[in-house]
Image (cartoon, rainbow, N blue to C red):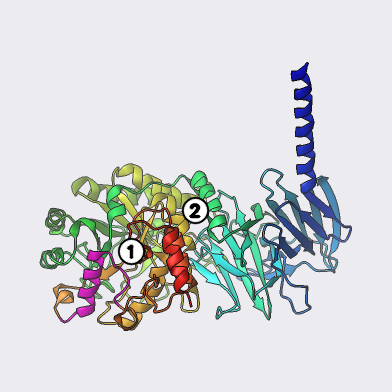
Amino acid sequence: MKHFYVKCVYILILQFVFVAAGLANTLTLSKEGEVFAETDRYQVRFEHGVLVHFHNKLTNETYTLPPQDDSNEQSGISIQHEEGHYGREETLNEHWDIETQRLSPLAIEIAYHSDYRTDKAVRMRIMIDSETQDLVIHQTGTSAFGGLVGVMWGCGYLNSQQVNIILPANGGQIINNATEFSRRGFAYPEGWEAQLAILQGEDGGFFVRSTDTTYQFKGVWYTRSGEHFDMRFQTDNFAPFRDKHEITSAPWRLNAYRGDWQVPARIYRDWMENAFQPTEPPAWVKDIELVLNSPGIDKETLQLLAEHVNPSTTLIHLINWLPWQGINLDKVDTDLEENYPEYTPKPEFDAFLEAAHAYGFRVQPHVHFNGVSPNHPLYPAFEKYQFRDPIRGWKLGWNWDNPATKYRLAYINPASKEFREYLVGQLKKVYETYPIDAWHLDINHLVVNNPPIDGLTPAEGNVLLHQELSEAMPGVVFGGEHLHEVTFPHVNLALRWNIPEDEQPHPISSFLFSPWTISYGHTSVPNPDLEPERYQAFEAAYQVWDVLPALRIRGPWILEPSMTLTHRKLENIATGYFWDIFSVGDVYFQGDVNADGVVNVLDLVMVAQHIGGEKPNNPRVDVNGDGVVNILDLTLVAQQIG
């Protein structure tokens, strides 16, 4: 009997817990379409389909300001009205007719209809996920006249004085009140590398993410006006748009958090790993400390390099190794016609590989992931698969609008089975003849919104080509240009661009991708002796992103004694100090992790990023030099700030 009473009490307690949990999540809806959502974590309010109030209950912070007439918050649909033009955004406002419907205690739907043209409608479903307390937003749009490009929703009246935006975009960046631009957009997947936006306050923040695994094209937009800024999140139809009358958005999830940006970034990274199953890099890739961008097959330079670097931790990115290529790193010789995708090496390629491997170097020849020369005999067969601008319809390619140059490439959609089979066959022949360590797949980041081919979208074709290359050449490592959610599961090396001058670098993308993909400097990184100012511009971003250093090797003269900064760079790499050849006054300040002459929050971020991780590229993060990066290093940096 005693056990019976205990069991009854236990059941009553459980019922109380479940009721209390249910009461903690509330979703109310007015006839005018105003939505109020509350959980244990946040309070949120929507007006006209726009999030206009966000309060973080975990930190007692409010990230929005009272509405003002000059706010530029927007939400609605984007319609292409004329062929060849992207079309205007049909913004929801008080003039649209509204229908509201409660679907369940924690789910509502609002339908917006244009009152001056009845052909357009946007349905917005808002629900609370009772398990995660995520606020989930889902939209559909319709247009009787077709040409429907996308559907969007927005966050308005955000406080530009108190909230920073952290985006995995263009390598990773932070947008705040000091940012030079007041309006910018980033397209997924090429510019916006992962479907995540973090809005960081002082003690916490909130984050927006999509859990779409179909690579549907998306965009995030930022606009600042006075003390306000807004963000919009758009989902696009797959091209072509002309006959598209409906669109269904990807699901968007919002939630609050306490702590710094790594809290939501870790949540997203865990989801990303489970969703896309990235490939772990082999041990030799993790050990790489330097990438040499070499213009050609030169055993004299190879011998000289072996005297100045550690070959076992050095990767040679071999640019010109084909018979029809010139010897200039910057361009193919104008007297030679390039002939991609033919990959029969120069006769001396075999001897060069043998010598490089004897020293201990790893070698990564440079190939094109989707490039076909217009003079190639098979170009007429591949032309129908050439990527085109999704709106205007013109063909895309490298130097495509400059027919006078001999270095032109057509960008072919890898959804084409015919093209994939040809490229895989060409590279496999080289692999079966020579001991290839890795392939650099140039332009593998390109994913253009073009119509499917044989049922495959461009992103699906991109993934499939990576997979087919890997299956055809077991043991070979693949690298690529740039990095994003479509490519990172399939490449363990990534050549990183520099960030635009008006954007501020942030380590968010490195945090998301670095467990699987090691990033290194671009082939266009200048020499520190020849162009010190341009070199510093690259290094400033690369330090924040924790990118492996890269050095351009144009010939033996690059290692002459007069090249003092080049030698200093190599010496620093050998001793583990990657970034300090331009330290202010050549003085190292303890805690100045990025060597910019001041100890500030950026140094804190860089140390925090490496706590509990493996050997960092920048040993300055081990501030006290005890061999581990932990809270003691973070404390030392904090003490030096100011």
Nearer the camera: disc 1 or disc 2 = 1
Q: Find the magenta span and give its range.
A: 562-581
Q: Is residue 124 left or right of residue 565?
A: right
Q: Position of residue 561 (x, y in %)?
A: 14, 79
Q: Residue at x 36, y 73 (%)?
A: 539
Q: Work out whether 464 lies above or below 619.
A: above
Kindly report the distance in space between the C-alpha atoms of the residues bearing marks 1 and 2: 37 Å
> Which picture quadrant has residue 4?
top right
Q: Secondary structure at mark 1?
A: helix
First along the sequence among labels 1 and 2: 2
> Which picture quadrant has residue 616?
bottom left
Q: Which residue of the protein is positioned furthest toward the front in this rendering?
A: 2
- Residue toward you, 460 or 530: 530
Q: Position of residue 456 (x, y in %)?
A: 51, 48
- Mark 2, residue position: 459
Q: Position of residue 178 (x, y in %)?
A: 56, 79
